[in-house]
Each structure stands twice: as C-alpha cells, then as structure tokens.
Image (cartoon, rainbow, N blue to C red):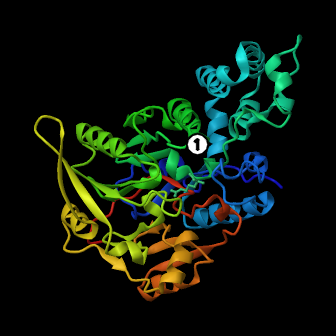
C-alpha cells in the first residue's frame, strides 16, 4: 500500500497564519497522522495497555484514513501528515539528537544496551529514526553488539526496547492551538507520554513552525487536547476527568490568562471512564453557537468558571450548568444543543462509537463516522451537513474525526455566524 504524502491544496501565498480561535471557523490547515507500522505492534496481550479496544486491520485503517484526508483536501483543507513533518524536522541535527534522546530509555535498557542503541540511532537517517520513534523497536530488532547484555538475554525477543505509539493517530490530544500559540499536551497515560517529545521537536524544528510560540508547558500537569474546546475567541472549555486533571485545568487557565489568550476557562467535570475519556467524546461544536452533545450529559454537565484576578491568579466561580456558564462566557443568549433525541440505548451505543465526536469543516458542516446513522440523521434534520467517513478500523482506537485531527489554521467566525 502506498502512503499518501503530505500535500497542500493551498499555496504558500494563500496560507492563513497558524491560528485557531474557534471550533468551527472554516478549516484551512490540519495535522493528521496516517496510521502506520505502530498499529502492527498491537496484540491481544498489549492492546488494553496501548489503549486500543481491539486489533485493527491495518491496511483497512489506512484506507479509511486516506479517505478522511481526501475529504479534507476536497474541501480545500491543507493536510499535514505527522510522519512527514517529523522526518523533515529530524533533518535538523538538534532535532535528530532530541529524537535519539526520546527513543532511548536507559532505565529500561541498562547502560550497555542504551549505548548500543544510542550509537545506532545517531547514525540513522531522519526517516529511519522517525520510524523507530513512531513504531518502536523490539529487543530482537536491536542492533547486535559484542558481549552478553543481561538485559538483552532476560527480555523476550518481542518485548519493546522502544515502545510503539499507536495513539499518534489521535493528533488532537498531543497538541492544541489556542489563538496563535501551540500547547504541547502533557499526556496522562503511560502509553502516550512519549508523544509529547515528538510534538515538541516537530514544533521546535520543522521550518513551517519556526517561530511558533508555545502556550502552556509540555511537562506541566496533565492536559490532553481532546479535553480542550475553543468555544469562542477567548473562551475555553476544559474537560477534567480520566486524562486532564484539576491541576492541569487550573494551570492551563493560569497560563492562557498570563498570555492573554483567554479571558474565561470553563473547567467541566466528566466521568472518569473510558467511555468519556475526553470532553470531546460527549460534546463537540457544530456551529458558532451550537453543539452536538450526548443526551445523557445535556442536563448533568456543570462547569466551574475560571477568570483571571488582579494578582495574576485564577478566580473560581460556580459551579453552574455547563450550557448556562458557556453561553454567559461566550456572550450569547443560548448555546444550542442539537437534539439527537435518541433513546438511551442508541445514544449510549453511538456515543461509544464517537457519534458526538465531529470535526467541523465550517459552521454547520461537520465530518462524522457513517456508522452513527441516527445521530447523523438528527444532525441533518437540524440543518447540519454531515460528511460521512468510514471508521470501522480507525474506531478501534476509540476516537472519531475530531480526535484524529489537530487544526492548525481556521478562519475567524463570530458567534452570530
Ligand atoms: N480526543 C479523544 O477522545 N481522543 C481519542 C483517544 C483514544 C486513545 N486510544 C486514548 O485512549 O488516548
């Protein structure tokens, strides 16, 4: 299967500056990750730990992903692919050194094997190093060396010397643009922690992002991008649950207030369950003043409203019902919920299958998984255009179109459209 390369449908002169101040402004540039060999590492023994529900059929997952990218390009969106930008970034010797550092875990390998792997990777091409960083390496794939390392002898040949990163697919979680700045997420789960290092070097060394200013600290308390919704310019909602911690939400608020990126942050408690691992699994925006939301969350979601105080601290108000707190912060009368009106069983099934995890291409135009037939129909009844994509294999990692995309440039829209 050939890999579709990163392509840009917009020329340099048409490029919008990297900036995202809404969830729904016409999408211009997005970062995706076409699933690769890292998915071939999943087995029934490791899939839970690696945060996949089952073992995906990789070729089909790639086809589904290619179709997703094609839909985006056909709508005039520039698609950047993470593997491409990683390889380009690694051409810079400083990035290459950072990549080697990120791959080699002395505590796992012991001093002797760590040195062997370090020197092997130091002479790897950017493409070879990128592959190891994404797909990992097993003990049997390690370069040979003189002498008998106890670590090598005592590990099973298929144990990971470098962990694979199958969840790179969910580019939404590992970095998030807030206004004109990028926040590298501090990922909570051990299986995803190393993604931070990859995004860190991409944004530091890829020529496209030279000069990109950072928001938040990549090594601060956990905040994952799937929990961050840019409800309107200056207004963020941050889910707090299985991934983003209360400390993460508070320190993100402190950071965006200090950088003048937001005037209000809503901290939204969500159940600490796999079904609701991020806020965007229960609620995504489909228009400047409308959301699609898991019906069972509609009346129960609450929010603490955080605002800056004069001492550069954070003032906490509430809690209040989420929809009310959001409308007030956004300066609109009401945040409309598209009523998917589903019975509880269908609602639960389609929430699990990412029915509420839509990616807006523009106000009132979203991409959704085709399998969520009832949610999609109700969205269309409400006047939303739903561009359907297949996700039978992609969904095995438990993420939908929003999870699989990191918007880098959107046009600005106002709450009135
Ligand atoms: N924003 C999202 O909800 N992303 C989906 C992440 C799925 C991934 N398997 C994870 O558990 O982190």
User: Quick check: 317 left or right of 352?
Assistant: left
Q: Quadrant of the C terminus?
A: bottom left
- What's the residue at 70%, 34% (across, down)? 130
Above or below, 280 relative to 103:
below
Above or below, 351 relative to 213:
below
- What's the residue at 24%, 56% (across, down)? 304
Q: Quadrant holding ligand 1?
A: bottom right
Q: Position of residue 178 (x, y in %)?
A: 37, 47
Disc 1 element: helix
Q: Residue furthest left?
A: 310
**Label 1 lies in ligand 1 vicinity (Cβ under 8 Å):** yes
| Residue 241 visible here | yes
Q: How many marks?
A: 1
| Residue 122 visible here | no
Q: Residues within 10 Å of mark 1 (few under 14, many from 20)?
A: many
Q: Position of residue 315 (x, y in %)?
A: 16, 46
User: Quick check: 103 left or right of 282?
Assistant: right
Q: Quadrant of residue 396?
A: bottom right
User: Quick check: 242 left or right of 169?
Assistant: left
Q: Position of residue 361 (x, y in %)?
A: 48, 66
- What's the residue at 43%, 86% (across, down)? 341
The one of 360 and 333 positioned closer to us in this rendering: 333
The one of 417 and 300 positioned closer to us in this rendering: 300
The one of 18 and 103 positioned closer to us in this rendering: 103
Q: Which residue is mark 1?
A: 192
Above or below, 274 relative to 176:
below
Q: Position of residue 61 (x, y in %)?
A: 73, 61
User: Quick check: 5 left or right of 168?
Assistant: right
């Amino acid at each position: 299967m050939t890999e579709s390369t990163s392509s840009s449908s917009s020329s340099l002169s048409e490029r919008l500056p990297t900036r995202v101040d809404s969830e729904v402004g016409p999408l211009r540039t997005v970062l995706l990750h076409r699933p690769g060999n890292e998915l071939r590492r999943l087995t029934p023994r490791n899939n839970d730990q690696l945060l996949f529900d089952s073992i995906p059929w990789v070729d089909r997952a790639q086809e589904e992903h290619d179709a997703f990218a094609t839909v985006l390009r056909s709508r005039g969106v520039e698609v950047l692919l993470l593997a491409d930008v990683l390889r380009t970034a690694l051409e810079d010797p400083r990035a290459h050194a950072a990549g080697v550092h990120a791959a080699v875990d002395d505590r796992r390998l012991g001093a002797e094997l760590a040195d062997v792997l370090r020197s092997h990777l130091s002479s790897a091409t950017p493409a070879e190093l990128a592959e190891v960083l994404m797909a990992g390496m097993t003990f049997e794939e390690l370069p040979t060396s003189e002498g008998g390392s106890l670590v090598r002898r005592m590990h099973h040949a298929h144990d990971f010397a470098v962990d694979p990163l199958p969840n790179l697919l969910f580019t939404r979680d590992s970095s998030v643009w807030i206004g004109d700045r990028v926040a590298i997420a501090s990922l909570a789960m051990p299986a995803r922690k190393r993604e931070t290092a990859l995004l860190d070097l991409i944004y530091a060394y890829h020529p496209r992002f030279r000069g990109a200013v950072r928001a938040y600290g990549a090594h601060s308390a956990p905040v994952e991008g799937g929990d961050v919704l840019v409800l309107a310019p200056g207004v963020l909602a941050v889910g707090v649950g299985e991934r983003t911690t209360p400390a993460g939400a508070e320190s993100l608020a402190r950071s965006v207030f200090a950088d003048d990126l937001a005037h209000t942050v809503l901290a939204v408690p969500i159940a600490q369950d796999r079904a609701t691992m991020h806020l965007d699994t229960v609620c995504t925006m489909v228009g400047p003043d409308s959301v699609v939301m898991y019906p069972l969350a509609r009346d129960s979601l609450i929010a603490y409203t955080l605002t800056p105080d004069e001492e550069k601290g954070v003032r906490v108000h509430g809690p209040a019902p989420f929809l009310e707190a959001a409308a007030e912060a956004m300066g609109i009368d009401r945040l409309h919920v598209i009523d998917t009106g589903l019975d509880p069983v269908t609602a639960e099934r389609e929430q699990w299958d990412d029915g509420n995890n839509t990616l807006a291409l523009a106000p009132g135009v979203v991409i959704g998984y085709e399998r969520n037939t009832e949610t999609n129909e109700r969205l269309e009844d409400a006047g939303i255009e739903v561009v359907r994509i297949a996700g039978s294999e992609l969904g095995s990692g438990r993420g939908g179109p929003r999870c699989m995309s990191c918007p880098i440039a959107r046009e600005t829209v106002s709450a009135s459209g």
